[in-house]
């Protein structure tokens, strides 16, 4: 079938494209241009001119056409503005999840369908399969270190039906081996670690550039409401953060709560970070219907977090609540919470 | 990379971007590469031989534009010629009061960005507006000219919409105020008659790869006696106007291409015009929500620029390419994606027209069968793309 591969110039999407070609598919390579390259310098850690060059060279090596589509406006509207808004509201956003559900498997998927492609493939480490009843399921990748299902839990049935993750069943080592076998120059290219559009990882500067109003001073208080210091913008903080508070004391202090309206950041000892429950909204139940009764599941609340066991239940409209068996640290509003049953994604939502 | 579409099945409609080598050009260049390898500046037999073929080419290029061979300077292409004309004139007038440069809003980036660069060095620049026809008005030039205008640079034919500018009239107006006149004739040379005397200009740029010659070679015609500061300094080649060992094979190719273009111009122009008119009428009739951009006349014979309502030009371009049809639009940016056309913007069109435009530019290889195939497949492709923007996967 005709498949569009979203090519970032990295080794994972490159190998994904190569494998699909070997499987006999009619593959089209497409790179998304997300920001203006006219300045010439590297914008972030991904999708720079150099990355586009790499994608082009890979496309030529495996014998597929390669196009670049300009998604600057859509990227601003869906990913960047959400990112800025969330930080300004004292929440910790997850832009990669929005990019997947609102750009790669939305705008890009629409464009792909316009080109008669049936699917969009990416280099994500995740797996999609189908239940006997024809229901689309999302699973973790076989490589637990690289699993990116956490970022894909917002995908709907319509989107999963048209998604393809060719490297989801492979280990990273295996993927690099394929890249060498295919003769791809990106075989040993380093993985991008940062959020792709934030140069040098300086989120605070990025946010304040886009929304100057966030640099409103506020106070840092302890659990009793006593002021301990001041700060220059709630966007600089995330729940569970220890560094950068500008405070000194006998024991380490962590961000417990961020109140954007008042500009108040509450800090406390690590023990105060413990939470045994969380609620979420904007739930996307993938594996089946929303669970009306408590059912066992594990919840992952950060990219680098081992999903913790507990019980999940759907709440009114599109919400959920989860009770952890063991207390968890740094449950950050705005982050995604994804519920798993083993390697199967039950559903995902946004932490309140 | 193996061609997934049979090469025979591909239809090339992007001749304004570039043209394939005419077989006679290729043959002559191969011979020159092997045999005429000498440095034209060398005294000996090999140098003389190389110099001779360069001179032959120079005459052929001069004939193409009604000029004298001694006034032809070879460059690396249209961009270098534009740079030499504009920078060279400005710098030559550096110690005079003439600091003002006039051009048009629809020029090629080689002109526009050169003006921007000079503006950073103190030049005052003005861009003449155009209306929805895409033609510069002589009155606009009259109004913009100042006593300190050094140079007026207006393209002969626009690369995106094909409209021909009233250069002769503009030249006369500029001269009356003592300004120099440069015309970028990159898109007109080889397609329509170009005569430097008729146009009344002081400098003219042309580029070989637009008329079935090789890439990397162009020329600038400079009126005898006109002082320009060279942009490439070094040896004394090209009468001291453009240093560097001459690109002999390129020059030879350009000469042959110029000769062929001149000989076939009337006949080919008429043939292509018929095809272009057929394509244009066919698309406008078969596809709803289409509109022609720019005046129908005066226009070069091979170009039609059409906007497609409710379709992203980018998607249309790719869909057509996957079907073996090569067209283009707007201008490319450094990464290879598209930017909205500054030409259409200058004509006053809104975003949905500037971002939805496709340029079809025909040439020697195109036949009526090509045109009819494009007319046949376009409606379905457009409809499919329009349908999908109405029913997105995720609202």
Image: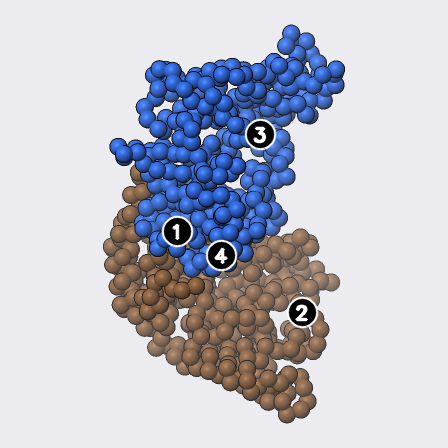
Q: Which chain is brown?
A: B
The vertical placement of A352 against A114, above or below, is above
Q: Is residue B204 left or right of residue A244?
A: left
In the rendered image, the residue lying farthest to the top is A224
Q: Which mark is residue A181?
A: 4
Q: Alpha-carbon distance for marks 3 and 1?
A: 42 Å
Badges 2 and 4: C-beta atoms under 8 Å apart? no
In this orientation, does residue A128 appear? yes
Marker count (numbered): 4
Quick one: A111 or B317, which is closer to the camera? Answer: A111
Q: Examine the image and state in which quarter residue A239 appears.
A: top right
The vertical placement of A50 against A148, above or below, is below
Q: Alpha-carbon distance for marks 2 and 3?
A: 47 Å
Instruction: Tell which subunit mark 2 falls on.
Output: B
Badges 1 and 2: C-beta atoms under 8 Å apart? no
Q: Nearer the viewer, mark 1 or mark 2?
A: 1
Marks 3 and 1 belong to one chain: yes
SS at mark 2? Answer: loop
């Amino acid at each position: 079938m005709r498949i569009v591969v979203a090519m970032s110039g990295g080794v994972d999407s490159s190998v994904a494209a190569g494998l699909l070609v070997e499987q006999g598919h009619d593959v089209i390579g497409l790179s998304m241009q997300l920001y203006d390259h006219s300045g010439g310098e590297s914008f972030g850690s991904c999708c720079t001119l150099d990355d586009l060059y790499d994608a082009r060279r890979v496309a030529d090596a495996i014998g597929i056409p390669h196009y670049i589509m300009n998604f600057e406006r859509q990227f601003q509207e869906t990913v960047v503005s959400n990112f800025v808004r969330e930080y300004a509201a004292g929440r910790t956003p997850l832009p990669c999840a929005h990019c997947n559900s609102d750009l790669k498997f939305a705008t890009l998927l629409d464009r792909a369908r316009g080109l008669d492609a049936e699917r969009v493939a990416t280099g994500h480490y995740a797996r999609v399969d189908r239940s006997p009843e024809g229901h689309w399921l999302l699973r973790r990748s076989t490589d637990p270190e690289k699993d990116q299902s956490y970022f894909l839990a917002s995908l709907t049935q319509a989107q999963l039906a048209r998604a393809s993750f060719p490297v989801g069943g492979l280990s990273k080592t295996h993927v690099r081996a394929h890249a060498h076998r295919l003769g791809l120059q990106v075989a040993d290219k380093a993985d991008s670690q940062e959020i792709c559009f934030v140069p040098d990882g300086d989120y605070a500067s990025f946010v304040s550039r886009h929304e100057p109003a966030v640099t409103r001073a506020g106070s840092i208080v302890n659990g009793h409401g006593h002021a301990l210091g001041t700060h220059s913008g709630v966007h600089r903080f995330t729940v569970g953060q220890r560094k950068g508070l500008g405070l000194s004391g006998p024991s380490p202090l962590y961000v417990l709560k961020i109140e954007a309206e008042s500009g108040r950041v509450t800090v406390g000892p690590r023990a105060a970070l413990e939470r045994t429950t969380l609620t979420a909204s904007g739930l996307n139940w993938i594996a089946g219907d929303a669970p009306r009764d408590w059912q066992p599941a594990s919840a992952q609340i950060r990219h680098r977090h081992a999903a913790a066991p507990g019980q999940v239940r759907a709440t009114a409209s599109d919400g959920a609540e989860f009770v952890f068996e063991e207390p968890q640290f740094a449950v950050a509003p705005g982050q995604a919470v994804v519920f798993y049953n083993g390697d199967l994604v039950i559903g995902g939502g946004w932490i309140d | 990379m193996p061609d997934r579409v049979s090469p025979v099945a591909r239809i090339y409609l992007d001749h304004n971007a570039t043209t394939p080598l005419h077989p006679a050009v290729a043959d002559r260049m191969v011979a020159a590469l092997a045999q005429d390898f000498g440095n034209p500046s060398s005294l000996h037999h090999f140098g003389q031989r190389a110099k001779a073929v360069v001179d032959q080419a120079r005459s052929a290029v001069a004939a193409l534009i009604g000029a004298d061979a001694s006034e032809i300077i070879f460059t690396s292409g249209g961009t270098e010629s534009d740079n030499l004309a504009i920078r060279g004139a400005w710098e030559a007038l550096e110690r005079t009061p003439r600091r003002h440069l006039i051009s048009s809003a629809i020029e090629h980036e080689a002109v526009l960005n050169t003006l921007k660069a000079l503006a950073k060095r103190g030049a005052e620049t003005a861009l003449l507006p155009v209306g929805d026809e895409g033609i510069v008005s002589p009155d606009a030039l009259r109004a913009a000219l100042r006593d300190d205008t050094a140079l007026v640079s207006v393209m002969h034919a626009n690369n995106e919409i094909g409209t021909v500018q009233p250069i002769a009239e503009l030249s006369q107006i500029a001269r009356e105020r003592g300004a120099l006149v440069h015309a970028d004739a990159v898109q007109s040379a080889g397609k329509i008659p170009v005569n430097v005397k008729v146009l009344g200009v002081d400098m003219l740029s042309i580029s070989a790869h637009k008329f079935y010659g090789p890439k990397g070679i162009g020329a600038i015609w400079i009126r005898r006696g006109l002082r320009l500061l060279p942009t490439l300094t070094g040896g004394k080649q090209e009468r001291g106007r453009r240093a560097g060992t001459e690109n002999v094979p390129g020059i030879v190719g350009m000469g042959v291409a110029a000769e062929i273009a001149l000989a076939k111009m009337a006949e080919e122009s008429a043939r292509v015009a018929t095809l272009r008119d057929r394509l244009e009428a066919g698309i406008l009739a078969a596809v709803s929500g289409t509109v022609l951009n720019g005046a129908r006349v005066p226009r070069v014979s091979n170009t039609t620029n059409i906007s497609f309502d409710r379709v992203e030009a980018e998607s249309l371009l790719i869909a057509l390419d996957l079907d073996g049809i090569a067209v283009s639009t707007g201008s490319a940016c450094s990464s290879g994606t598209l930017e909205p056309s500054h030409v259409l913007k200058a004509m006053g069109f809104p975003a949905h027209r500037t971002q939805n435009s496709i340029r079809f530019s025909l040439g020697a290889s195109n036949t009526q069968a090509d045109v009819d195939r494009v007319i046949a497949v376009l409606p379905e492709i457009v409809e499919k793309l329009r349908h999908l923007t109405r029913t997105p996967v995720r609202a």
